[in-house]
Amino acid sequence: MNAFLNFFQPKRGVHPPEHKAESTQLPIATLPLPEKLVLPLRQHIGHFPKVLVQVGDHVLKGQLLAEAEGTVSAAIHAPTSGQITAISDAVIPHPSGLPDLCITLLPDGKDTWIERKPQDWQHTDKHELVASLRNSGIVGMGGATFPTYIKLCAESKCQIHTLIINAAECEPYITCDDMLMRERADEIVQGIAIAQHLLGAQKSIIGIEDNKPQATKAMETAVQKSAMQTAIVTVPTQYPSGDARQLIKLVANIEVPHDKRATQMGVQVFNVATVRALYRFFCLGEPAISRVVTVTGNVNQPQNFEVLFGTPLPELLKAAGGEKPNTTHFIMGGPMMGFDLPTNEVPITKAANCIIAASPALFAPPPPAMPCIRCARCADACPIQLQPQELYWFAKSDNFEKARDYNLFDCIECGVCSYVCPSNIPLVQYYRYAKSEMIAQDKAKEAADLARERNEFRLARIEREKQERAQKHAERALGAKQDSAKQENSTEAPREKNDALEANNHAASSDATTKTQADDAKKAAIAAAIERAKAAKLAAQQAGDAPKNMTPTNPAVQQEIAEIDARRQHVGLEKAVETNPNIDAEKQAKIAAAIERAKVMKAAKEAEKLEKEP
Amino acid sequence: MLGLALVLGLGLGYAALKFKVEGDPLVARIDAILPQTQCGQCGYPGCKPYATAIAAGEADINQCPPGGDAGVHALADLMGVEYKPLNAEHGAPKPKSVAFIDENTCIGCTLCIQACPVDAILGAAKHMHTIISSECTGCELCLPPCPVDCITMHPIAVTPDNWKWKYPIIPIRAVPLSDVKLKEAVN
């Protein structure tokens, strides 16, 4: 049934002229040590790594220069021994042509290795191996540059049953994977064994396009020699069958839904160069410091080179016999998905699989774009089965929400639509524009949401502080009121206390008994006074919430009360003087009375103030 | 018939109570369009008060310079009114910037901390202050209170991280006059 339906399906993808034969005539050559190496810190997808060296430091080959920081990040190692001469901004191979932070290394020519520690990967704990991989600097060498250790960590989350090795190399001109398989098949097969072991996958499949018979043969021989169960599947040469989802469908017949990852379907895909880097890391103890790069196009001697990361492009071009005079610019990556380099003074990075020298003969400037005639050839050719003509319309008119609805973010920017367009519309450029605008909008929205949250929190905090202040104020006011009430009540107590003391003194003076007896009596009297005061307070509380005369109503009344108090006090004191020869007791009573008076006055004043305030 | 009306009426009444919408959803939708700079250039003390004013019909939709033309378009779409260009009275749109404190000049007066609407300034009395640039909205509200004028606005630089692909333009090529004459001659 499927075959029947497939018959009516349009043939997806395209088959542009291959141009692969030029660069496969010569074997992979190793580039001589360049005069200086410029290592961009951003050679991968994710966070900036943390620089561990300083200007002036002498480093050895393979030494860690910057370590992975954050979840998605990759380390940078010294490709050779030498001295760090600068850590500063320099032009990086990026379509923007903007500078970014780079480490400049001046080789000392000795090429001294740091101590290499190969690992016995078959008998070591998997988690330990993956953890060590974090600072190996290995990223996806197919061009995506996604840190490899994260892809191998996936084991805990999803059970991977199939490991697919991407050796399709579907883009024209690029031959680095082809040559790598021809010459380093053994290393690749051992790398596959390591990756399969780490993932716990039951089977592994190598997908190779049928335009690489020599590579297929070399891989078959290597697989037989290693006694592994790896299957080699040749797929028809059709661009873009090297896309991970396309290759999974072709070799494993599993279609990954657009909202799922391949790992959720139990499949993991690695590029051949990546598994070879895995082999070199675990079996030889070498971190990622070099890669195979195809130099082709308008150069005198197209060839593949094993190049140290950070090698300036002119050195590489010199090794390829130099560019021909009519070279207009250089392309990094393939002619379909690559980008024009802003200048040729850029370093080779982990993503650089191919450098093409462009000339007007090879890459003619595109003819002027004509209006879209809605022929839907792009829709027939789109490997993701999107509607490029609709997306073009939305992207052109900045109708981003609609573009999102039509799944613009599923577009892999393979360029097939632009290739087949009879009106020569640069469709992918419109999609890239729309995508980066949408990403910027999403980021702005996120920032706005954060700002709103922070602003709301700030306003809430100010409001809360205001309320707290008001509450504190109210509490203090209430406390003062209660205080004054207490004091009005307790004014009775000291008087009684005074009486008790007086009585006690009377007793002491008249009876003239022993001192201990007097003390006991004193204590008893005090206790009695306290009891009486408590009882009075309780009675007052029971009678009402507060005594009615607690707050003096007006200053005149207040003054009167104060005067009466003073008189009472005066009389009491005179009495005490008359009756009591004990000066100490008199003094004490005086002081107590004064304190009481002051307290009453203060409380009254405060109460008055509070009454006025609201 | 009456019974049915009664049942439906009760059902509706219950639904109105049960699914009552808290707050004004229109204000929230307007607020979502506004850039949350909290700069007050619109004449209101923040984005939310401005959104409330638009919803109440007290404010016009073209008073937000940081939102730019795109913001006015979005508001016009939402409110179902005609688009109008930004009102120049409220200022012109500027490239997005973040505040920067010259730490040598800062005297630690905390006035800017009190002015910042999003708490993006860190510091204490008599200690140097600094901007948390990832939280700064570029509202410029910290500039006027600074007694020593140590705060400046820095536009956000373009890096490979935030760089955007340009809108594809077909470059216009100058055709030499001789070519044109040649063509005319052929015709």
Image (tube, coloured by chain):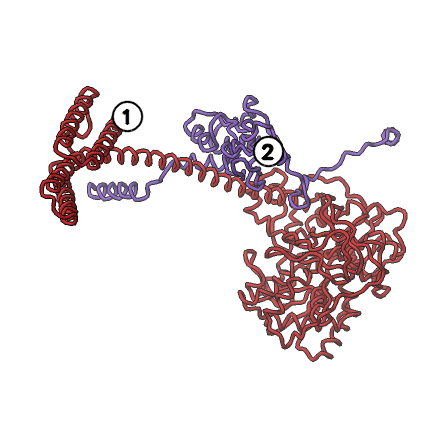
Q: Nearer the viewer, residue B20 or A291?
A: A291
Amino acid tagged 2 = Cys
Image coordinates of residue A364 in percent, x first then y, are: 81, 46
Q: Nearer the viewer, residue A313 or A382?
A: A313
Look at 11% across and 37% down and name the residue there: A543
Look at 73% across and 37% down and name the residue there: B170
Q: Nearer the viewer, mark 2 or mark 1?
A: 1
Q: In this view, does A51 lie to the left or right of B140?
A: right
Residue A239 in sight: no
Corner quadrant of residue B157:
top right
Q: Is residue A577 left or right of residue B175?
A: left
SS class, disc 1: helix
Amino acid tagged 1 = Lys
Q: Identify the residue at the far top of this view.
A: A556
Q: Say if A358 sits above or below A11 in the image.
A: above
Q: Nearer the viewer, residue A375 or B126?
A: B126
Q: How crowded is mark 1: few (under 14 residues within 10 Å), some or many (20 or more)?
A: few
